[in-house]
Amino acid sequence: MNNALKTLMPVGLAVLTLLAPVYAQFGAPKVATVTATAKPTTVAPGGRGVLLVTVAVGPKYHINAHAPNDPAYIATVFASQKTPGITFSPPLYPAPKAMKLSYAPKPLLVYTGRAVIAVPFTVAKTAKSGKTVLAGALSFQGCDAKSCYPPASAQVRAVVTIR
């Protein structure tokens, strides 16, 4: 029996090691919900609009701001997806809130509650009429009062009609 345990022990450890990332991914709490809308929903060729990326941060959580005041913290960043006939401008991030937490020597710059990132876009004068999907990804790191969780990414999509 002793030899059987010695043989099975490394196999069991290997299985646990392989399952750890799965547990970390699915065991982490849902810190935020991310959605997007296009305003206006109809834009003429040559016109402008804005993709509004809304982050609803859950109670008891916060996410690091786009420009954290400590380089050790992972910034919230939106990356737009290339879309034919659409040119995105750099995202405009909301003003962060300063929050004092027990694990940080100075207040951190964070987003809590509802934060809206505005991503201006221009429709090419030569863009074809019809529905166009605007898409991108928001990467962020969620934390609570005691610790931070692994970084997360949320894909978003919104539809704009060109005519």
Image (cartoon, grey):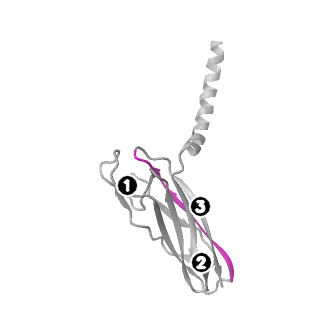
Q: Is residue 123 above or below residue 140?
A: below
Which region is colored magenta?
A: 129-145
Pointer 2: residues within 10 angstroms few (<14), some, or many (20+)?
A: many
What is the secondary structure assignment of the residue under circle 1?
loop
Q: Mark number for residue 155?
A: 3
Residue at 57% over, 79% down: 40
Q: Is residue 47 above or below residue 133?
A: below
Q: In the image as oriented, which residue stretches furthest toward the front?
A: 59
Q: Is residue 52 left or right of residue 45?
A: left
Between disc 1 and disc 3, the foreground one is 3
- Name the kind of residue labelled 2 in the image: Ile
Is there any visible trace of residue 69 in the rendered image?
Answer: no
Q: Is residue 114 left or right of residue 99?
A: right
Please state which of residues 21 and 114 is positioned toward the viewer in this rendering. Answer: 114
- Callout 3 touching callout 2 (CB < 8 Å): no
- Name the kind of residue labelled 1 in the image: Pro
Q: Position of residue 111 (x, y in %)?
A: 42, 59
Mark 3 or mark 2: whose residue is earlier in sequence: 2
Question: Dot 2 corresponds to which residue?
Answer: 86
Q: Mark number for residue 71?
A: 1
Q: Is residue 6 above or below residue 25?
A: above
Q: In the image as oriented, which residue stretches furthest toward the left?
A: 106
Q: Quadrant of residue 28?
A: top right
